[in-house]
Image (cartoon, coloured by chain):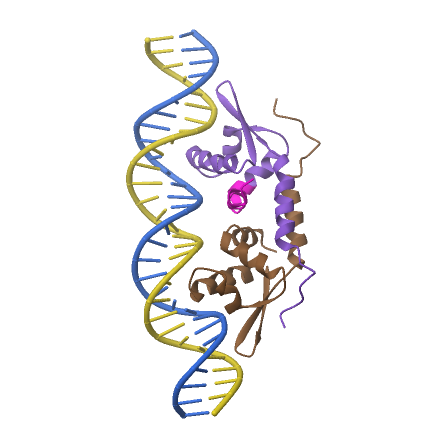
Chain colours: A purple, B brown, C blue, D yellow
Amino acid sequence: MRAQEVFKAISDPSRRKVLKLLRRGSKTAGELAEAFDMTKGSMSHHFNVLKAADLVRCERRGQQIVYSLNTTVFEDVASLLADLFRVDKRNGEHR
Amino acid sequence: MRAQEVFKAISDPSRRKVLKLLRRGSKTAGELAEAFDMTKGSMSHHFNVLKAADLVRCERRGQQIVYSLNTTVFEDVASLLADLFRVDKRNGEHR
DNA sequence: ATGATAATTTGATAATCATCAAAATATCAA
DNA sequence: TTGATATTTTGATGATTATCAAATTATCAT
């Protein structure tokens, strides 16, 4: 997993909203786009960022493309965060 | 806690490196800056972003300013992430 | 007060990012 | 194959961000 791509992806509020919408189950690109006040082109850009971070999966179903949450990445992100905040007990405070 | 500011803050590799350096204990602005290939002014900007997100605390000690990790935010971020990925069991998949 | 050191702030510039409108691709249905 | 629908891709633009150099603030020591 690329920390860079994951953190960048979730740093945008629109993309976090997409993730939240997907918690209830998969949705088509159009259904997701309806929930936003921006063009489908812009939404598609956000989908790409989320895909690059492997936070969502997508699958074509006829004319539409169905997006779903990739929950397997969650553990990776969680441990990465834990790592970031894990205090090293061996060394003390600054003098 | 502001999700926006926290996620933006940790989306930058330099700032994540600062957090990692602080795991071992507090450090002065100068000590932190030494570990990077950029001016102290730029580092100061990054410190400000981390402070705005409440990820670090700082305290003046004589001529220097000592930064330290604020671990209390960690739980907030963790639960925010968990929330983001929590799958809602009530509703099924997309038809 | 003066000079030295540590750090921040400011103003400018270059790079990245979000967004839009329009064009392109893919699938379906007639 | 033609038209309609769903989505993505492209090219351009404005906004945000990272960075630097220089100016500023704060503290200490003399």
Residue name at image x 59 percent, y 62 percent: B56
Q: Position of residue B42 (x, y in %)?
A: 43, 62
Residue nearest the viewer, comparing A77 with A26 = A77
Residue name at image x 50 percent, y 18 percent: A62
Residue nearest the viewer, comparing A38 with A2 = A2
The quarter of the picture where residue B91 lies is top right
Please say whether residue A3 is one of the residues in the magenta stretch: yes
* Residue bounds of the magenta highlight: A1-16
Judged by its main secondary structure, the magenta piece is helix
Residue name at image x 54 percent, y 54 percent: B16
Left of A7 or right of it: where is C12?
left
Residue nearest the viewer, comparing B51 with B44 = B44
Q: Position of residue D1 (x, y in %)?
A: 32, 9
Which of the image's four quarters has the N terminus of chain B?
bottom right
Left of B30 or right of it: where is B25?
right
Q: Position of residue B50 (x, y in %)?
A: 54, 60
Left of B34 or right of it: where is B89?
right
Q: Position of residue A24 (x, y in %)?
A: 64, 33
Residue name at image x 44 percent, y 38 percent: A38
Please say whether residue A92 is one of the residues in the magenta stretch: no
Left of C5 or right of it: where is A19?
right
Which of the image's four quarters has the C terminus of chain B?
top right
B49 above or below A94? above
B64 above or below A25? below
Residue nearest the viewer, comparing A1 with A28 = A1
How many numbered badges does the structure rendering display?
0
